[in-house]
Amino acid sequence: MPAELSRRLTELIRWIDPGPGASHLVSDVSGWWRDPSVLADLGPALVEPFRSARPTVVVSPAVTGYLLGPLAATALGVGFVAAHKPGDGRLPAGTLTWAQSPPDFRGRQVDLAVRDRHLGPGDRVLVVDDWVATGAQVRALYEICAARDAQAVGTAAVVADCPPEVAAELRVRSLLTGADLAP
């Protein structure tokens, strides 16, 4: 990853105190989306470790994945498939393949769905997300890939804050670690 991109990502993150009763600060990565040089560099930097795996499609979960996924897909010259969550608004029409994540860092299980017509046998899937804390959503997306007879080739993330053994198991490659961004 270019040193300038790493520096800008680190500079542009903000940590917000959500107020009384909160047990931790909340990351605000909106500065990443405001910076045109970061936007231009993110897609190519995310996909570089996976080019040799020859992904045929990028899959990303709502909500920030809907920004990062197309950036990565464009850098690879492949298509993008959105992974929907029922709480994020109206679900798409048509047949969906669903999976439920194991508990995430908040202890919640997240339902994810992909349109069947956009993912199928022979697809080589690169999962892209902004932050991997536990790998829970990645696991659900890999389960969807398996159900659709597609092969998950790995996960590209801006930040990996999961244990090294989880990152290795799920083939997570990230631009930064949680330690790089510690408040």
Image (cartoon, helix red, strand yellow):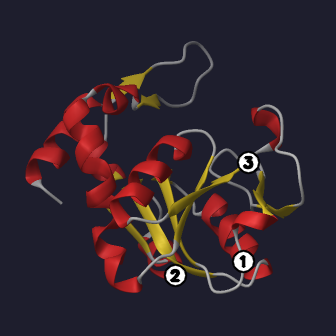
| Local SS, label 2 | helix
Is any atom of residue 116 visible in this view? yes
* Amino acid carrying mark 1 in the image: Gly
> Can residue 158 be seen by looking at this rendering?
no
Tell me where residue 41 appears, x and y as whole percent: 23, 48
Looking at the rendered structure, the number of numbered marks drawn on it comes to 3
**Foreground: disc 3 or disc 1:** 1
Disc 3: CA contacts within 10 A as few (<14), some (14-19) or many (>=20): many
- Give the position of the N terminus as an image quadrant: bottom left
Image height of 83 relative to 92, above or below: below
Quadrant including the C terminus: top left
Q: Residue at x 73, y 81 (%)?
A: 146
| Mark in the foreground, 1 or 2 | 1
Please tell me how crowded label 2 is: few (under 14), some (14-19), or many (20+) other residues with Cα within 10 Å.
Answer: few
Give the amino acid at mark 3: His
> Which amino acid, mark 2?
Glu
Q: Residue at x 53, y 61 (%)?
A: 79
Q: Which residue is mark 1?
A: 120
Residue pointed to by mark 2 = 169
